[in-house]
Amino acid sequence: MISAEPAAQLESPKPYIPTAQNIFDIVLRRELCKTMLKHYVAFVSAIMVIVSVNNIPFGASLVQNLGLAQSKGHGGFASFSGDPCRLVIGVNRTRPRAYDDLTNLVAKTGGKTVSKVSVEGQAIAMVVDVPLDNLSFLWNEAQAAGLARYMEPNMVFKAQFVPNDPYYSNQWALPKIQADWAWNKTTGNSSIIVAVIDTGIDYNHPDLKNNYVPLGYDWVNNDNDPLDDNGHGTHVSGIIGAELNNTVGIAGIAQVSIMAEKALNSTGWGFETDLANAIFDAVLEGARILSNSWGGDFDSSLIHDAVQYAYENGVLVLAAAGNSNANSKVYPAAYDEVVAVAATNQLDNKAAFSDWGSWIAVSAPGVNVYSTMPTYHVALNDVGYSTNYGYMSGTSVACPQAAGVAALIWSRFPNATRNWVRGQLSFTADDLGDLGFDVIYGSGRVNARKAVEQGPLQHDMFLFRYDMPRLVQPGDLVPLSVAVLNFGSSSESNVNVSLLVDGSVVDSAVVDYLAGDSFADVTLFWNPMESRTYNVTLYVLPVASETIISDNVISVTVNAHFLVTLNPSRGPVGTGVTVTGVEFTPNGLVSLTFNDMFLGYAATDEFGDFTFTFNVPFSTAETWVVKAYDANVFADANFTVVDVTPLNVQVDVGAIHFRGEIVTFHVYTAFNGNAVNATVTSVLLYKPDGSNETLTAQSVAQGLSKISYMLPSDAQTGSYALVITAGYSANTVQSNGTAFKSFLVSPTFSGWNALLISVNESVGAIRTDLGLVNVRLDALNATLTHIEGESVTLNSSLGTIRSDLDTIGFKVTAINGTTATIETVVGTINGTVTSIRDEKATILIQGIGQVESDVSSLKAARETWTIPLYVILASALVAAAASLLSVWMLRRKKSDAQEQAQPKSPEVQ
């Protein structure tokens, strides 16, 4: 019940306190005393209300608030003052002789002690009969003397209803929502029709056939036979309305009429047109409750139209919240007209898969729920589900739990409006998680017992949803979204919604007109400036009556700065993270979220410290906030999700190399196609004998590193392998890559057509059939072995190498007499100058060949040539003589030839 306070007390409101039925947690037939109940059946209810409103001991409220101490005829129950009342008095066990003194005090009132409750010889309580007009005297005297701890009616308890269904023991959810207690009030009414919009129903199932009504349709196959070919719809139907107490199978929550609208096919999928048609048809066929264990993240205008049609016709629509463990809206559950149902487990914690958000209305059991399955083969049997009966988990099975409780409410209060039932479902839920409404459980986990026992509510207004950040910074303008539900049949005008912080109004709004059986959304704002915890209260207050008719209290912490650390604080999706928190509320529970997605709870020790581990859920590469909070404090820390797309590492190196060569490796690194300055973290060169050597890379440009390695002259020959590991880290990137490259070291150039094409600082670039190699010339021990024209042949420790004069740097550096000194990159050689003409010398190199070389670079060339003149003249004379001799010989041969050709004359006789 909701307390009614005068407007003058708005600045210091009293919080809502649950009724005594909640406190005692029992189902009972109350009996304060038989005489009083005979004359005034509402007596105990009135007492309960006032106890809950004033939050004072029951006995005191009994005496002080009902006027039982007044004289006869002056209000209250004084007209029955002579009748005795049976009470239970709690004996103060710390006071010696308290029981005896209470016995004497009861006798003074004209009453008597009926019995005693004792443990190990010590009195705990006593049952007494006392005249009504002496109750005030008894209570005041007992309290003044410190003899009594409490005084209350001797209540009568009723045996809990236990069905005879053989699988009832498998249905942990029913005792959890106290359906077994609710059945003492009502088991349901067949006039209430619940439409299950799903995959159909096995209407011949022995646990369903008696509660099934053939009003639905098969929109998948376009016929009047909504037979289930998947199994999901039958399971949902059994949770709501399996036959109770029939010695068969399980027990359904409500004994109401079940109709099936088949809009999902055998695989569990359905078109929005079929689902919308199912909703329209269910409403037309008289369904008062629609259970929808399906949904998606697409906001369909057609589905919304169908939902609004149901709402306008007074139908209560419930839907599963979704199974992605995400703070993302699922439709139709997220529509304002729909009761969104989240899932809880056996410990009343959030089911790991259940979606969450400000649009959640209530929660219900949704883990390992046992229910009916088709008696024939269906699609779900192929993936491990049983026939006849079986377990399922999901918000799909939480939704029918709430639908079943709603059906019990309407059965118990058949004249209630749809919004009244909706308010009752939320108002009587067991509050879980944060105080009041929260984004995980909504108003709480449904409670069937309280839903059918408590009611009707005192007023027709109810704050059925509100959304406010629990963790804010000083100076933030904090929005609070409120939905006000009018579940009465008459309209309301000038409805004031107020936001109070620590008892003071900080913002308010007026809803000018709120029709019966409708709701309105209101947004209020608050600007906290201090770092501390605040008590935030919401009120609905019709201005005309100046009476608070609904209130909710939540605790909001503003930047309390309690310490939370993450280890690690950076990593990819799936990283295991340990959260360490200190100085939270001791021996409590801390809620943890990642990017506002619920992770779970952590229990604090006696110092308020805790640890919690989780794996980073799927999210984009950026920095996210991990929040930890309880009812009093909160803290947060940042975790950076990094992109771990592999780094592209490429190595460029020739396929064959030789002893004495300097091998150059070029390493290229790129991330997502872009060259990046990655760090080469490891370079290992594996040799033919299995040993390895660590090399060092040097960055030379964006995305390019270079590794140089000198192969010794006695290097192992065979296959070498280079393994390079590189990493790149920047902002939200943490990328690693590895490259592998093999090459061959050959003992000789022989057969590879080696050609020395350039020399740079004693390093020769040698082209072979398999590629270019760089070799230190001093390691080759190369010597010049042959010259022919401009071509040169070198002999080296690795074999024969071809080149040309320019490449080996052939240069005459001195001429001394006929001896020329010649420098090359492979060493100094000497030759004999045989002629000099136009600053070009012809030089004969013994055993190698003759070459003509430019000697113009020599200083004072003609003067420094020390070739004697007689040598030159002698050479000229010899050449001239040789020439004359050659001419004479030629002429002589010609003359001889002519003589031989002349004919001879005959002889005279």
Image (tube, rainbow, N blue to C red):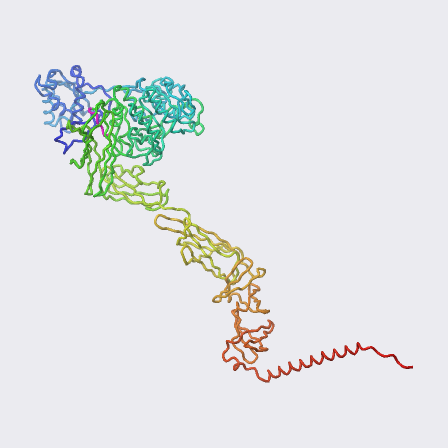
Residue 120 appears in the rendering: no
Residue 439 appears in the rendering: yes
Say above or below: 663 vs 324. below
In this rendering, would 660 be left or right of 70? right
In this rendering, would 550 be left or right of 664? left
Q: Residue furthest right?
A: 909
Q: Position of residue 388 (x, y in %)?
A: 41, 23
Question: Magenta span covers which residues?
Answer: 458-463
Say above or below: 841 vs 114. below
Say above or below: 121 vs 881. above
Query: Quadrant of the rendered structure where residue 589 is?
Result: top left
Residue 145 or residue 520, whichever sits in front: 520
User: Is 475 a magenta residue?
Assistant: no
Q: Position of residue 545 (x, y in %)?
A: 15, 26
Say above or below: 145 vs 734. above
Query: Quadrant of the rendered structure where residue 81 is?
Result: top left
User: Residue visible at 12% across and 24% down?
Assistant: 65
The image quadrant where one finds the C terminus is bottom right
